[in-house]
Image: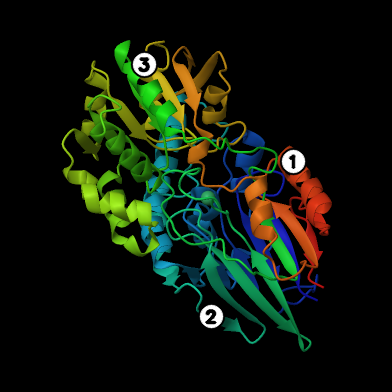
Amino acid sequence: MAYIQFLGAAGTVTGSKHLINTTYDSGGKQGIQVLIDCGLFQGQKEWRERNWQDTPVPAREIDAVILTHAHLDHCGWIPRLVKEGFRGPIYATQATIDLCSVVLPDSGHLQEEDAAFHNTKGSSKHSPALPLYTLEEAQDCLQYFKPVVVEETTQLSPELSFRFVHAAHILGSCMAEVVLTTNGQSRRLLFTGDIGRVRDSQVAPGKVVHSGPQEGESADVLVMESTYGNRQHPDTDPRPELARLIRETVERGGSIVVPAFAVERTQKFIFIVKELMESGQIPRIPVYCDSPMAIKAVEIFLKHSEEYTVQAADLIKKYGSPIEWPGFTFAQTAEQSKKINDSQFPSIIISSSGMVTGGRILHHLAQRLPDPKNLVIFIGFQAPGTRGAIIKDRGPEVKIFGDFVPIRAQVAALEQFSDHADPPELLEWLRTFAGKPGVTYLVHGEPAASSQLRDLMKRELGWNVQVAEYKERVEVK
Ligand SMILES: [Zn+2]
């Protein structure tokens, strides 16, 4: 009997890893073992420490990875898996591979920086502190990626095939439909990865990717994300509010700091800023996109035009490449990044990581948070325990580079920019299913979010829904 084991994103939103084993046998490896996603745990220490634990099955015994998208909480553990001995193919869309080729080495670089920092401060219980993986190891793992065309079936073994379908979450993102055929019986497993906004561009402005989630799905086993399981996005257009927040900050001489994922989220945001400037709703102040992958990120974004919504395509046609926009600076080197700190005039600084877990955003926040003139805007989900969540919840202070930085700047969150569907949108999509799945496991949510969504789905749809637990094994019946 085949089983699924939840090795991450169960009880939390990070560390997505779901193992499929096609032959249930506790005595050793049989059949084929495939990992759906291989993400990094982020946030609370309790979870981050799991990045250092081996997988329950040896990495070399995993035959393949199917990767839904390029967010670190879905792909960021791949270099470690390879370091532990995995040598199989990693299947992903070309856009996801392009994103991973900048995101993973950047992650390796941050791991090295972190370890070096702990060594100089002596703040790690390990001596010397080591990186989870290095930049070089991250680059090395890219050779195992294999591009897969959306909706084309790939046969991994006689008993397992899969195909990607659009998820509308970020550039390149997909759900994985897996078909298991054992003992003459076929079962469909649908792993959603992260699910994008179902609504149109009025309610979810700046939505870049056009299609998905696909209607008319069917599954015997549905493994679904539940990040926003207990919260609804506001259904107002956030642009007037964004314009007002920026204007007020500029009037009092402050700067705007925006933590954002370097690829897509940043580009989506700067297109909105550009529009607000061109229409005179905000003043023309300098905009800095600060990331070692700043230029590459724009190039990848512009390359994958096949993914755009009509609105996104129109904006790109109208304004061209952001690299050429006057007043917009793409800081790649550390020197260019430091220069932004010298700027005393109001500006907009967009930098990663989006949840303030590392990266150059740390410098900008350490410098700008103590001053009430400034504004920090969150445009993405902040996992509990991350610095992003502490700042968003307006804690009195946040620890950055070993020091406590007071949070005196104004803090705002515009949830409409989220790339995750909320409960009404999820229901809207689930109602299009051809039939009830035999069982649904909710993953990728804080416990309160997952259990509330479970109750809602039971009540509204009458489905058999369970919240997955960390390391839990479930038989595929
Ligand atoms: Zn994601």
Q: Is residue 309 visible from the viewing direction of this image?
A: yes
Q: Which mark lies nearer to you, 1 or 3?
A: 3
The x, y position of residue 231, in whole percent, is: 66, 37
Q: Is residue 247 left or right of residue 55?
A: left
Q: Quadrant of the N terminus?
A: bottom right
Q: Which mark is residue 248?
A: 3
Residue appearing at x 62%, y 57% in the figure: 17
Residue appearing at x 48%, y 40% in the figure: 417
Read off the residue under disc 2.
Answer: 154
Q: Mark 2: which secondary structure?
A: strand
The x, y position of residue 220, in whole percent, is: 75, 71
The x, y position of residue 39, in whole percent, is: 56, 53
Q: Earlier in the sequence, mark 1 or mark 3?
A: 3
Between residues 460 and 325, which one lies in front from this camera angle?
460
Amino acid marked by disc 1: Pro
What is the CA distance from the residue labelled 1 to the residue labelled 3?
37 Å
Estimate how packed mark 1 is, as few (under 14), some (14 to 19) or many (20 or more) residues with alpha carbons within 10 Å.
Answer: many
Q: Quadrant of the C terminus?
A: bottom right
Read off the residue under disc 1.
Answer: 447
Q: Is mark 1 within 8 Å of ligand 1?
A: no
